[in-house]
């Protein structure tokens, strides 16, 4: 059971502002979802390592070289900017 | 040449032989989109430079050069793949004005092969959904019956193909997002082996599950498309360093000696009678081609939905943390309502722009990763995931391909399931396992419901054995001819 208090706490962790309506709806819907998902607790997984990526592959690292980037292009999607800097409202 | 029926191989050959220009082909589909897509809503952006790009292909051919295996083929690209200079939204308000500074590797490879990007197709926001109802740019209607969903999340790509608005499309598949809409819209679609296709430039949902793949109107077209987009990529370290076979050249529909597994657990689910009938028809056709059927057991598949949704949402909660409104994406109006602190800045940007389903999944994933719950949810799901994958690998010791339905039902009505998230998630029972195990999976048109809605069957194979899938797909395609039919009025 996911109470609205728990949902509120998780929304803080996720930095996600929710409306009162969403808090109540998610509490109810996610409780139903998790009640169904509880079934996996019955699977015996003693000594089983979690699988985090599906195929057995070696990690290939590329050479770490700085490549030229177009600063203007990188800034072109900024919600706000000042010269060559991303601009945000004062938060402290 | 009837371009609404032409395969991409036929288009390529005609363009290369200068019997038809790339410009003519592109114009044909641009005109169809303008005429027919208003109601279907499969495209969310058209490429304003499509005709220029087509002209360049024609110029290359005129100059005696070979533009590549997709010469002059217009392709519809899911709006989850970055296209340089062409708005890419993931059908989210977060990215409503986002213009990528670069092409996704898949898009780059399509262009290098001579394809023309026709436009960007609709999807469930950030690929989260199975009905295309969660799009900030409106739902897509199924061309077979406009009251029905096209499936999701690659619903725009599937619907565009069904309405013959493009001869080929790109989709992405995290838990069935290529295969389920392909089934609902009566087209072919393959999710390749994890690591076959580069994820670079594809807006991330769940990185250990996401794969892009082709959707098309035939087996051969899918194979040709996949050949063009596969292969190791220096910008995606999870792409495999394995050779890319020429699947299209090795296609064979004779299935003598091929063993096909039927997983009894899949058929124990409650399945719509039309889906059961069509699946049986596909099995009969394959038997006639010499395939041998064996029973296999995959006991962990009954847990696939919980494992999938715990892992996918956990990865999504981390991947979507980047949308904070600092460097790109939606930012709240802080002139009107001044910001209180940094958390208020992040929370409002995110809370105002993400749609309901995306928020629900970020919440589920954050919960599953949070202190005190990590072991019971995320870690446990990862352990059961290993058991599930190992079971598939064992099953493939006694068969080459596993066949199952794609979904328990044909397409459902718009609005029918959108109020109950759990019901919508359980709909993904047959498709999520291949992503969890990293296996290739394909949806092949096999028949129709009594009411005339398309139904596909799913084929799965060992890692990197797409050839077997294509061979079996070809036998179904030739035997049942279900992929040849187009919706009424198309």
Image (cartoon, coloured by chain):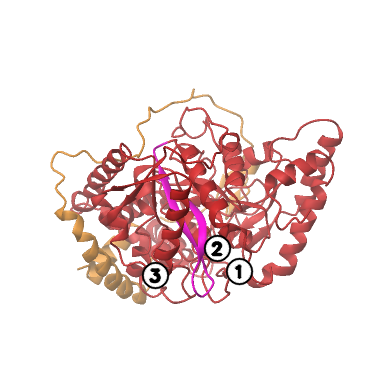
Q: Which chain is red?
A: B
**Chain ID for label 1?**
B
Image spot of residue B198 (x, y percent): 51, 38
Q: Residues within 10 Å of mark 2 (few under 14, many from 20)?
A: many
Residue at mark 3 shares a chain with residue at mark 2: yes
Which residue does the numbered mark 3 point to in the structure image? B273
* Viewer can see residue B272: yes
Q: Earlier in the sequence, mark 1 or mark 2?
A: 1
Dot 2: element: helix
Q: Residue at x 30, y 75 (%)?
A: A24
Dot 1: element: loop
Q: Nearer the viewer, residue B301 or A1?
A: B301
Q: Nearer the viewer, residue B279 or B288?
A: B288
Which residue does the numbered mark 1 point to in the structure image? B143
Q: Residue at x 57, y 69 (%)?
A: B142
Residue B185: numbered disc:
2
- Cα separation, mark 1 vs mark 3, equals 23 Å
Q: Is residue B340 left or right of residue B119?
A: left
């Amino acid at each position: 059971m996911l109470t609205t208090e728990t949902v509120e706490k998780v929304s803080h962790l996720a930095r996600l502002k929710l409306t009162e309506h969403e808090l109540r709806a998610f509490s109810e819907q996610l409780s139903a979802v998790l009640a169904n998902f509880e079934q996996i607790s019955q699977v015996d997984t003693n000594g089983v390592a979690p699988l985090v990526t599906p195929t057995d592959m070696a990690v290939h690292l590329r050479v770490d070289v700085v490549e030229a980037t177009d600063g203007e292009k990188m800034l072109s999607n900024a919600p706000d900017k000042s010269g060559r800097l991303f601009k945000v409202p004062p938060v402290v | 040449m009837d371009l609404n029926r032409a395969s991409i191989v036929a288009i390529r050959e005609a363009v290369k032989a200068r019997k038809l220009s790339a410009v003519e082909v592109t114009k044909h589909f641009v005109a169809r989109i303008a005429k027919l897509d208003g109601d279907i809503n499969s495209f969310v952006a058209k490429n304003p430079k499509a005709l220029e790009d087509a002209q360049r292909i024609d110029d290359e051919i005129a100059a005696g050069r070979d533009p590549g295996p997709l010469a002059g083929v217009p392709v519809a690209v899911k709006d989850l793949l970055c296209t340089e200079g062409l708005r890419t939204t993931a059908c989210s308000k977060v990215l409503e004005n986002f213009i990528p500074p670069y092409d996704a590797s898949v898009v780059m490879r399509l262009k290098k092969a001579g394809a023309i990007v026709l436009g960007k197709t609709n999807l469930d926001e950030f690929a989260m959904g199975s009905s295309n109802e969660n799009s900030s740019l409106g739902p897509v209607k199924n061309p077979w019956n406009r009251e029905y969903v096209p499936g999701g999340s690659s619903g725009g790509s599937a619907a565009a193909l069904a309405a013959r608005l493009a001869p080929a499309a790109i989709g992405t598949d995290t838990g069935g997002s290529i295969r389920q809409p392909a089934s609902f819209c009566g087209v072919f679609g393959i999710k390749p082996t994890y690591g076959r296709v580069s994820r670079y430039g594809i807006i991330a949902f769940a990185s250990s599950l996401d794969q892009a793949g082709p959707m098309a109107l035939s087996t051969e077209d899918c194979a040709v498309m996949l050949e063009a987009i596969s292969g190791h990529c220096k910008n995606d370290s999870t792409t495999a360093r394995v050779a890319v076979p020429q699947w299209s050249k090795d296609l064979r529909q004779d299935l003598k000696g091929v063993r096909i597994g039927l997983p009894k657990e899949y058929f124990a689910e409650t399945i719509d009678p039309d889906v059961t009938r069509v699946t049986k028809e596909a099995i009969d056709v394959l038997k006639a081609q010499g395939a041998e059927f064996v029973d296999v057991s995959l006991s962990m598949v009954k847990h696939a939905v919980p494992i999938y949704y715990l892992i996918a949402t956990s990865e999504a909660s981390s991947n979507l943390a980047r949308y904070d409104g600092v460097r790109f994406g939606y930012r709240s109006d802080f002139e009107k309502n001044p910001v209180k602190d940094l958390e208020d800045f992040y929370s409002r940007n995110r809370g105002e722009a993400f749609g309901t389903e995306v928020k629900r999944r970020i919440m589920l994933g954050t919960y599953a990763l949070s202190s005190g719950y990590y072991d019971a949810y995320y870690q446990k799901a990862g352990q059961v995931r290993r058991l599930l994958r190992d079971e598939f690998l064992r099953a493939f010791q006694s068969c080459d391909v596993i066949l199952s339905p794609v979904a328990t039902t044909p397409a459902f009505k718009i609005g029918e399931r959108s109020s109950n998230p759990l019901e919508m998630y359980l709909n993904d029972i047959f498709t999520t396992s291949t992503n969890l195990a990293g296996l290739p999976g394909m949806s092949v048109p096999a028949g129709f419901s009594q009411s005339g809605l398309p139904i596909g069957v799913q084929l799965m194979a060992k890692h990197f054995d797409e050839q077997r899938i294509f061979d079996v797909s070809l036998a179904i395609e030739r035997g049942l001819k279900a992929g040849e039919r187009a919706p009424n009025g198309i």
